[in-house]
Structures are given as C-alpha cells and as structure tokens.
Amino acid sequence: MGTPSEHADLAERVEELLAADGPLPIVSAGDPVLRRPAEPFDGQLAPALLARFVEALRVTMRAAPGVGLAAPQVGVGLRIAVIEDPALVPDEVRVARGRVPQPFRVLVDPSYEPVGPARAAFFEGCLSVPGWQAVVARHAEVRLRAWDEQGRVVDEVFSGWPARIVQHETDHLDGTLYLDRAELRSLASNRAVAEFWGQPTVERAAGALGFGLPGPAV
Ligand code: ZN
C-alpha cells in the first residue's frame, strides 16, 4: 500500500518524532488520525527505524502509564500497537476481571475474531480520552492474528483482561475508539470511578447509572 514517496513521508514523520528523547506526545480524541483506518505495515519503516519506533511506543506506554498503545495515538497511521500489563491489582479484581499479567508484545497488522458468544463488561479508559472511563461489553475471548516485530506469525487466543487490551488496541487501528462501543450512560470521570465504582464488577454501577449489561456471561 502507498507509493514510495508516501512511504518516505511516513518514515520521515517517524524520524522527526524520534528526534526528541523520551515519551512521545499522545494525540487526543478529535484528531483525525484516530478516526482513519491505519495503513497495513508494508516495510514503510526500515527494520532499524521500526525497532526504534517500537521502543518509543513502549517508553510512551509505560510513562503514561497505560497497558497498550497504538501507533495512531502518536500520530502515525500504521497498523502497529504495543501491549503490556503488569496487572498490579488486588486479588479480587484480578479474579473478577481476569486481569492476569501480560508481557510486552508488539502487534503488527493485528486482527481479531470472537471465540464463543461470551462477553464481559468492565470500565475501561484510553490514553487518547484522558480523564474518563466507560463500561464496554467486549468479547470475553478472541483469536488474535498478527505479526510480531520480527515478522513472525502470531495466532493466539486471548481471554480475560488481555483480550480486552488486544481488542481496544486493534480497534484503534481501524479508527474506532472505545467510546464507540461503550455504554454511554456509564461514562464517568476518573474521579467518579475512584469515588464510586472501585468494585471488581460493574453491577452496582449499572443499577445506579442506568445502563444495560450483557447476559449471564458477565
Ligand atoms: Zn486507547
């Protein structure tokens, strides 16, 4: 995809971004780059530049801090994302949400499909929509196909919180934000979540704020 000169433009843009050390600026909702489907990766960045870009995504994700970051969130319209979750949460949260640690991974050209009908609804947020969270009912389990940064095939089933992360990040590459899939009546500031909705599950929030939940699979 793209002409050689478009490839050069993207590589130049990434070089410019990487000229400054440290975390990259994260673009926020309203920037059209977050609403355009990103280009499949097709060698637009030479291996050394790709490696530096992936490292910058990792540094930026950790500094935010976040558990995933997609290239469009730093203004680069390429189908590349990184994920990593140390899952430092209380045991009851870990069990209720399936929030198990997810090692650092690079996803190139990822796509996913549901495995089974089960859905899980929890609050989630996005580094490009700072300060807010909302409940999203997502596939409880997905099959993810992608390549890693070395060009090796990834074909893996994710469940629990890691399944939520890979859906959220892959959606970014399609120009979709989590708010497009959220129960809007659940929209809550981080402050309100901290004050009212720290329970491991979202039943109380659903009752009090008046939004629906998926069937028994929740
Ligand atoms: Zn996001």
Image (cartoon, helix red, strand yellow):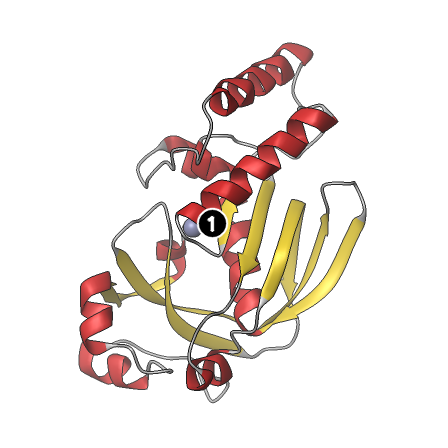
Residue at image position (19%, 82%) is 208
| Residue found 50% across the figure and 42% down from its top | 59
How many C-alpha atoms fall within 10 Å of the one at disc 1: few (<14), some, or many (≥20)? some
Residue lying at 56% horizontally and 53% vertically, measured from the top left: 83
Determine the image quadrant of residue 151.
top right
Q: Is residue 18 above or below residue 192?
A: above
Q: Quarter-wise, where is residue 198 in the image? A: bottom left
Residue annotated with mark 1? 62
Front-lying residue, 92 or 29: 92
Report if the beta carbon of the residue with label 1 is closer than 8 angstroms to ligand 1.
no
Question: Where residue 135 sits: x, y (%)?
Answer: 35, 69
Q: Does the rendering let one see residue 31?
A: yes
Q: Left or right: 104 with respect to 146?
A: left
Q: Outermost residue, top direction?
A: 5
Image spot of residue 50 (x, y percent)? 66, 30
Q: Is residue 33 above or below residue 16?
A: below
- Residue at position x 47%, y 49% from top? 62
Q: Residue furthest right?
A: 152
Going by the image, does 29 lie left or right of 50? left
